[in-house]
Image: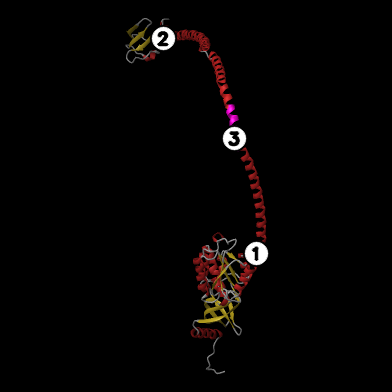
Amino acid sequence: MNENEYIYSVSQLCRETRLILEGHFLNLTIEGEISNLSRPASGHIYFTLKDDKAQVQCAMFRPQLRKIGFKPENNQHVLLKARVSLYEARGNFQLIVERIEPLGEGALRQKFDALKQMLLTEGLFEAERKKALPALAKKIGVITSQSGAAIHDILTVLKKRFASIPVLIYPVSVQGDAAKNEICAAIQLANERSDCDVLLLARGGGSLEDLWSFNEESVARAIYASSLPIVSAIGHEVDFTIADFVADARAATPSAAAEMLSPDQQHWFAHLEHLTNKLGQSAARSRQHKQQQLNSLSALLKQLHPCRQLEMHQQRLDDCYARLLQAPGKYLQRARLNIAQLSTELLHHNPIHRIKSHQKIFASHQNNLTINIQKKVYQSRLRFANCTKALELLNPLATLSRGYSVTKKIADDTIIHSTQQVNLGDKLHIQLQDGSLQTTLDKIDET
C-alpha cells in the first residue's frame, strides 16, 4: 500500500458519506409501498419503502409524525417528502421522512372517513330528521345515468311490480369531475318542480374511486336539504357511500330500491278483489236496511192517516170533557183534605204547649239557682269566719293586749331586740295596746 495514501476510519467514512448525501439530495419526493413497519416506545416509526424493483429504509421521528392526519400501516401506498441520509452506527443508507400522505384508494378512504365523521357530528345522519317514504308513490323521480344498467334494472322491476307508476328520469353523470354538480342540480330541480313524491338516487357497482361522486360533501348536503324523501341505491350490497348515510332510506341495489318504492301488483289485485267483495256485501246490507226502513215508514204512514188521527183526537176530546166535569169535585175534596191536615198541624204546633213546657223548665232552673246561691253564701261566710280567726291570731295588737310592748330607737326607728342595740341616754319609743310612751334610757341590766 502507498504510505502517502490517506486512510479512513469506518466512522470517518460513514460521516463524510452522510454529509455528501445530505448535501446533494436535499428534499426529495418519493412514492412507494410501506412494509416492515415498527413502532418503538420512543414514538418514532421505522419502515421499508419499496417498489417492485428496490427498497430503502426510512425513519420518521415523533415531531413530524404528530403533524400527519392518518396512521401509516403496512402495504399502504404513500407519497413521502424526505431527505437522504446515512445511519453512521450501522452504515445503513436511509431516508429521513419529513411528511407522508396516502395515495390512491387509501387516500380516498381516509377522506371518506374524515367526511363521514364530520357529517355525523353535525347530525346529518340522525334518524329523527329522515323523512317517511310514501306508501304508494304517484310519481318516482330517478336521478341516474340514462345509459347505465341501473335505470334498466329499475324500470324492469317497476314494470313487473306496478307498471302504472310513472317515472321521471333526471339524467346525470354518475362518475367523473362533473358528476357531483349534475347530481346536486338534479336534486334541486326535482325539489323546485315538485313533480314527484320521492327521488331515487342510483348507479351500478364500482370501485371506491368510481363511486366517489356520491361521497362528495356537496352531494350529501343537497340530499340533506331536499324536501322530497330520497332513497339511495349506490353500487352493490357491500358498497356504502356518504349518500347512503344521509338519504332517508338505503337500498342494497337499484333493483331493491325499485321494489322498496313499488307495491306488489298481484297483492293489490287481491286487495282490490277483497274490497270489491266487501263493497258488494255492504251494498246488500244497505239495501236490506233501506227495505226495513221502508216497511217501517209504511206502517207509520198507516198510523198517521187523517181518519186514524181524527179518531184519536175524538177519543182524547171525550176524555178531556169527562175530566173537566170531575175536576171541581176533586178540587174541593183535595182542599178539604188539606184544611184538615193544616188544622191538625196547627193544633200540634200551638205555642201554649211550648210555653207551659218552658215555664216548668224555668221554675226548675230557678229553684236550682236559689239552692246553689244559698249554699255558696253559707260556704263564703264559713271561710270568712275562719280567715278572721286566723287574722286575729296574727294581729300584733292582740299580742300587745297580753302585756307585751314594742320598743324602738327614736334615732333610726329600729326595733330593739337586744341590750347590745342601745346605749345610756338613748331616747326610746314604747308601743302599748292603748297608746305609746317616750323615755330616756338611764340604766342597762344584762342577764
> Alpha-carbon distance for marks 1 and 3?
63 Å
Residue 104 lies in quadrant: bottom right
Of pointers 2 and 1, the one earlier in the residue sequence: 1
**Quick one: 365 or 18, which is closer to the camera?**
365
Q: Residue at (65%, 68%) from the top-left corner?
A: 160
Question: Does the magenta run of residues contain 308?
Answer: yes
Dot 1: what SS?
A: helix
Q: Can you give x and y, in whole percent of width and height, for residue 179 in the image?
A: 53, 74
Q: Nearer the viewer, mark 2 or mark 3?
A: 3
Q: Can you give x and y, in whole percent of width and height, for residue 231 in the image?
A: 58, 66
Report which residue position mark 2 lands on: 396
Dot 2: what SS?
A: helix
**Residue range of the region highlighted in magenta in the rendering:** 304-319
Q: Can you give x and y, in whole percent of width and height, for residue 256 in the image?
A: 63, 68
Residue 435 lies in quadrant: top left
> Alpha-carbon distance for marks 2 and 1?
134 Å
Q: Can you give x and y, in whole percent of width and height, for residue 100 in the image?
A: 53, 76
Could you tell me if residue 252 is visible in this image? no
Mark 3, other Cα within 10 Å: few <14 / some 14–19 / many ≥20: few
Q: Label 1 is placed on what type of residue?
A: Gln
Q: Residue at (54%, 69%) from the top-left corner?
A: 114
**Quick one: 137 or 30, which is closer to the camera?**
137
**Quick one: 328 or 17, which is closer to the camera?**
328
Check whether the beta carbons of the residues at disc 1 and disc 3 lie within 8 A of each other.
Answer: no
Of pointers 1 and 3, the one earlier in the residue sequence: 1
Mark 2, other Cα within 10 Å: few <14 / some 14–19 / many ≥20: some
Q: Label 2 is placed on what type of residue?
A: Pro
Report which residue position mark 3 lands on: 309
Q: Nearer the viewer, mark 1 or mark 3?
A: 3
Report which residue position mark 1 lands on: 265
Q: Nearer the viewer, mark 2 or mark 1?
A: 1
Q: Vertical placement of 391 versus 226: above or below?
A: above
